[in-house]
């Protein structure tokens, strides 16, 4: 929160602007996580298309279990990251009933003459690398400076509906990114049961209880749609393979009947 206060005081940003900066930074963090959580399952997928030996079959199963663990871990960590961001921002910016938000309360606290302030000029100077020199040479008027903050002005106020609206848009946008990434992750999984296991593990996370009912529904829809899409692809590929195998087997059977028919051999 200290960085947000610095933006408000030093960069003359409103609380609304500082919220926008924080949400933007958290989006970058989410995207960075997605970029660092790439899954590699192409070699395993290639192995499952061939008729493996017993040793290769064991390696394929091991590779599949590893990919499954990686996808589950990445998805669960991504969800925890989204949920953590939502709750952190709400704890800073959202009012609690008739009480002001944490950041508004801190701004009002700065105006007081108390010595146990969370943020003060003395504490800021004391945390700088040259703190001892600053304490020695700065005049008392600077060391005891208390910035004036118009806590009644619009720049120092942020309503609950405004915070909720911005958070909802942020959540929707990053859920869309999560959905796209999850669709890529599960392409490495060739078992419908394993894909369903990924979705079930994600939706059983304890952190989901920190979301509102609406937010949980949004997240559940995101995960289920991505997993169901992959399951449909897996079943579609299985049915296509079965159809091709049946057609090949039927063709061989008809050819066997034709070549073994005496009439066919006689040219009749």
Image: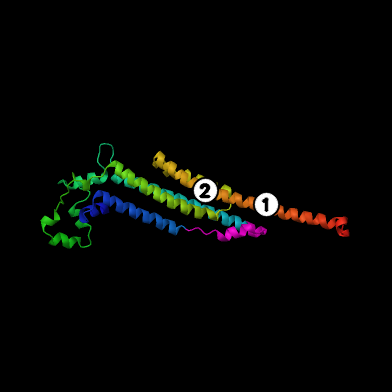
Give me the residue at 83% from left, 58% from top. Answer: 259
Q: Looking at this rendering, what residue extends furthest in the top direction?
A: 98
Question: Going by the image, does 41 lie left or right of 22?
Answer: right
- Which residue in the structure is indicated by mark 1? 243
Q: Main secondary structure of the magenta part?
A: helix
- Which residue in the structure is indicated by mark 2? 227
- Which residues make up the magenta segment? 38-57
Quadrant for the C terminus, please: bottom right
Where does residue 222 sit, x and y in percent of width and height? 46, 46
Q: Nearer the viewer, mark 1 or mark 2?
A: 1
Where does residue 48 sit, x and y in percent of width and height? 62, 57
Question: Going by the image, does 254 lie left or right of 50?
Answer: right
Where does residue 211 sit, x and y in percent of width and height? 39, 42
Q: In the figure, residue 59 lies in which quadrant? A: bottom right
What's the mark number on residue 184?
A: none
Disc 2 secondary structure class: helix
């Amino acid at each position: 929160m200290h960085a947000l206060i610095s933006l408000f005081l030093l960069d003359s940003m409103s609380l609304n602007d500082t919220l926008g900066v924080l949400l933007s930074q958290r989006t970058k963090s989410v995207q960075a996580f997605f970029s660092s959580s790439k899954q590699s399952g192409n070699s395993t997928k290639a192995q499952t298309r061939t008729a493996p030996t017993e040793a290769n079959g064991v390696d394929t199963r091991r590779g599949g279990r590893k990919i499954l663990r990686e996808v589950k871990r990445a998805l669960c960590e991504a969800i925890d990251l989204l949920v953590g961001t939502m709750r952190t921002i709400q704890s800073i910016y959202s009012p609690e009933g008739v009480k002001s938000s944490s950041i508004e309360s801190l701004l009002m606290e700065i105006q007081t003459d108390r010595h146990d302030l969370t943020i003060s000029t003395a504490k800021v100077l004391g945390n700088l690398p040259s703190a001892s020199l600053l304490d020695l040479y700065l005049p008392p008027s600077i060391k005891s400076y208390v910035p004036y903050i118009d806590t009644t002005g619009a720049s120092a106020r942020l309503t609950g509906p405004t915070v909720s609206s911005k958070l909802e848009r942020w959540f929707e946008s990053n859920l869309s990114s999560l959905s796209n990434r999850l669709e890529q992750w599960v392409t490495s999984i060739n078992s419908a049961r394993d894909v369903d296991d990924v979705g079930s593990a994600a939706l059983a996370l304890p952190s989901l209880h920190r979301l509102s009912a609406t937010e949980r529904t949004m997240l559940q829809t995101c995960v289920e749609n991505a997993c169901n899409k992959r399951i449909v692809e897996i079943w579609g590929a299985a049915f296509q393979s079965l159809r091709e195998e049946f057609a090949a087997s039927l063709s061989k059977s008809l050819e066997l009947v034709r070549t073994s028919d005496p009439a066919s051999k006689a040219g009749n």
